[in-house]
Image: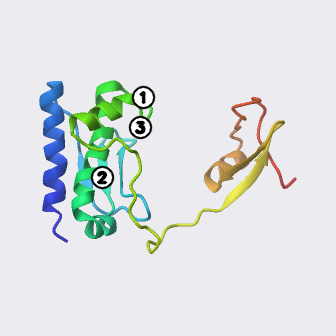
Amino acid sequence: MNDKKLYEQTYSYLESAQEYYGRRFRLDAIRIDLKGKNAGYFKVQRDGHAVINYNPELYQQYKEDFLLRTVPHEVAHLVAYQEFGRKIRPHGEEWKNVMRLFGADTRRCHNYDVAEIQSRQYRSFSYHCNCMEHTLTAIRHNRIKKGQVYQCKKCRQPLVPAFR
């Protein structure tokens, strides 16, 4: 796969942001191995490295739109995070302002046809509190089994398995 254009476009948006904000933004790696239905994501890893990961299948299928929509979307996450801090909303005003700087669409999700793309199926577990039912992922379910306590955001009561 020729991903030169993908790298060039990513760094082009990053350079625009650096010029506008008058500072350097740290991007440690660009990966093109994302699987599933997400077009891309920005993440700061535990070791502090800033990484953007793109979905090669969606890139190949929707090249031009991907370069105009997904690439600025992920670079905007990086810029917003590093400029405004980690407490901002992922698709909040800070992110939208960076997207506007790039001249990009501020809608948060892609509209690529992902019906044919394979994705992982995660097992879910039913829990409840005093006010409602909750569906938790296997990750949270296993953390509860190890002693982690999760509370309902509404009633502040601990979540308990619905299958007891």
Image coords of residue 146 (percent x, y): 69, 47
Q: Is residue 121 above or below residue 139?
A: below
Residue at 35% of width from left, 29% of height from top?
94
Residue at 36% of width from left, 58% of height from top?
39
Tell me which label, 2 or 1, sits earlier in the chain. 2
Query: Mark 3 and mark 2: span between their CA atoms?
Result: 13 Å
Q: Is residue 72 above or below residue 59?
A: above
* Secondary element type, mark 3: loop
Q: Which mark is residue 70?
A: 2
Between marks 2 and 1 in the image, the one whose residue lies nearer the viewer: 2
Query: Mark 2 and mark 1: span between their CA atoms?
Result: 20 Å
Between marks 3 and 1 in the image, the one whose residue lies nearer the viewer: 3
Query: Mark 3 and mark 1: span between their CA atoms?
Result: 8 Å
Q: Is residue 40 above or below residue 101?
A: below
* Secondary element type, mark 2: helix
Amino acid found under the numbered disc labelled 1: Ile
Q: Quadrant of residue 149?
A: top right
Q: Quadrant of residue 148?
A: top right
Write down the residue under mark 1: 88
Write down the residue under mark 3: 91
Residue at 47% of width from left, 71% of height from top?
115
Image coords of residue 44 (percent x, y): 36, 41
